[in-house]
Image (cartoon, rainbow, N blue to C red):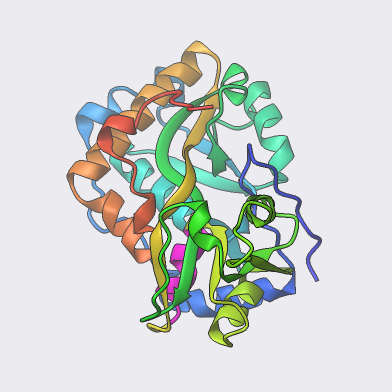
Amino acid sequence: MKELVQRISLFRRLILVAGVTSLLVASSGLAGAANVYARFNAADARLVPASLRGVTWQIATDASYPPDEWMSGTKMVGLDVSIMSAVAATLGVTFVENNITFSAIVAGIKSGKYQIGNSSFTDTKSLEKSVNFVDYFKAGEGVFALSGSAASFRSIADLCGLTLAVVADSPEQVTATGEVAKCPTNEPLSVLSFHTDAESEAAVLAGQAQEALVDSQAAGYLVSVSKGRLELVGKAHDVAPYGLATAKTSTGEGLAVALRAALRTLVANGTYREILRQWGVAQGDLPLSKMVINGAIF
């Protein structure tokens, strides 16, 4: 059983235990998600700092967070890996993904050991003091329910009157339990906590809970591999951008500019949205105007 990883709001990290196995099995049809249209772009490549041309980039990733990044056998797969592969193809560079502890990534970038941190980082004003972020995705809290249900989700208040599945000790549990006291007495909110997103999914499928509140990309992924049994409800709540992290140096800043250019090219040629679709996280599509450097909103 994998050790529990505590999530905090700055880094939306998934709590993983043995239940994650069901995600890995269900993902077999998506594990090949790749750079469908990605191709070399000379203009973008010229933006890469001279010292980073012709060398293999070292990428730091904590591969413990499906569907963004995890190990399928000896191979690292997931949304972030596919995005990085497409960016590298666009810029004409090679890279190696290093599977390291999440808390060590920023220090590794600052020391120069890694050129990029690619691990579902929420871009925050606090972290921007230590690294640059090139925003490429948005994530928050998402709701799913049985397909064809009458469920709706426009705000947290819509959860009143329901039995809701959440992951224990997650931001979503904090959100849900905070709403319990606010619900009308004739529409109480009952919150059931589980060890994993997979267990929350099982509760919904069994009718034990009417809806589940989990990380938005996990919600999209679970729906995408549910064979039509589940559907997303409403839009993600409490959304913030994810960013690729680079060093606060002239080279790191130049690299950030090149990464931003490559991401925008991937939007233009369709690769970006196809990758999101393949991993079941199309709701995380970040508008081109928001693909900026250091775009934290809190």
User: Which residue is the extreme one toward the left?
Assistant: 269
Name the residue rendered at 31%, 55% in the picture. Answer: 35
- Considering only vertical position in the picture, is 13 above or below 124? below
The rendered magenta stretch, by its main secondary structure, is classed as helix
Q: Front-most of 3 and 31? A: 3
User: Which residue is the extreme one toward the bottom?
Assistant: 206
Looking at the rendering, in which quadrant would you find the C terminus?
top right
Q: Does residue 255 appear in the picture of this structure?
A: yes
x and y percentages locating residue 216 in the rendered image: 49, 56
x and y percentages locating residue 270 in the rendered image: 21, 51
Count of numbered marks:
0
Magenta residues, as a range?
A: 217-226
Looking at the rendering, in which quadrant would you find the N terminus?
bottom right
- Considering only vertical position in the picture, is 267 above or below 291? below
- Determine if the magenta segment contains residue 222: yes
The image quadrant of residue 22 is bottom right
Q: Front-most of 95 and 164? A: 164
The image quadrant of residue 233 is bottom left
Q: Does residue 118 appear in the picture of this structure?
A: no
Q: Front-most of 145 and 59? A: 145
The image quadrant of residue 134 is top left
